[in-house]
Amino acid sequence: MSNDTDQVFNEYVTAMVGGQLFGLPIRRVQDVFLPDRLTKVPLASPEIGGLINLRGRIVTLVDLAYRLGLTRRSETAMAIGVELDGESYGLLIDGVGEVMSLDAAALERNPINLDARLAAVSSGIYRLEAQLLLVLDVDRVLDIDAGAAAA
């Protein structure tokens, strides 16, 4: 056993949306899937991509690119399944990456010049070799009413 026991790691599922790398805390991620047979919801806010039936559960799809003011780079969207207050959600993303284990001490506060929509849902950043990884606060991402009011 090594003696750097004071080092704590956070694990994230990484996802690309509009060319930006995001990390979702692995404990919040239930599954990754390709949304199939999407049902649009009339009069829903524009962030709501629709509903799907996923293994017997009704899942609300949230268009993360629209929610964060980014431009989707992929036509074949994937979704990361998360849950909040017993409800199932799928966050529509361009693509899923790897699971990263990052040193908790390296997590930095959001830069002062970070876009306000991103800052509102980010709990911090990691500076990786090639780019920034924004850590998403899933609860804030799913707080659609507050996001719509802020926009």
Image (cartoon, helix red, strand yellow):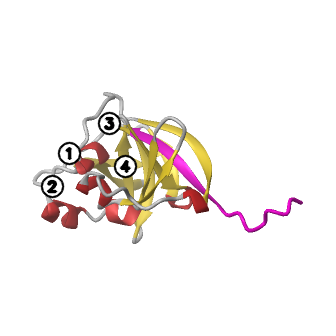
Q: What residue does disc 4 label?
A: 91
Q: Earlier in the sequence, mark 1 or mark 4?
A: 1
Instruction: Measure the C-alpha gap from mark 2 to mark 4.
Output: 16 Å
Q: Amino acid at mark 3?
A: Gly
Identify the mark nearer the N-term, 3 or 4: 3
Residue 64 included in the magenta stretch of the image: no
Distance of label 1 from label 4 (alpha carbons): 15 Å
Upstream in the sequence, badge 1 or badge 3? 3
Q: Which residues are magenta?
A: 1-16
Residue 25 in the image, given as x and y percentages of width and height:
52, 58
Give the numbered dot on residue 44: 2
Disc 3 or disc 4, which is closer to the eye? 3
Amino acid beneath label 1: Lys
Which residue shows up at 21% across the image and 67% down it? Answer: 146
Q: Identify the residue at the far bottom of this view.
A: 85
Task: Identify the residue position indicated by label 3 in the image.
Answer: 18
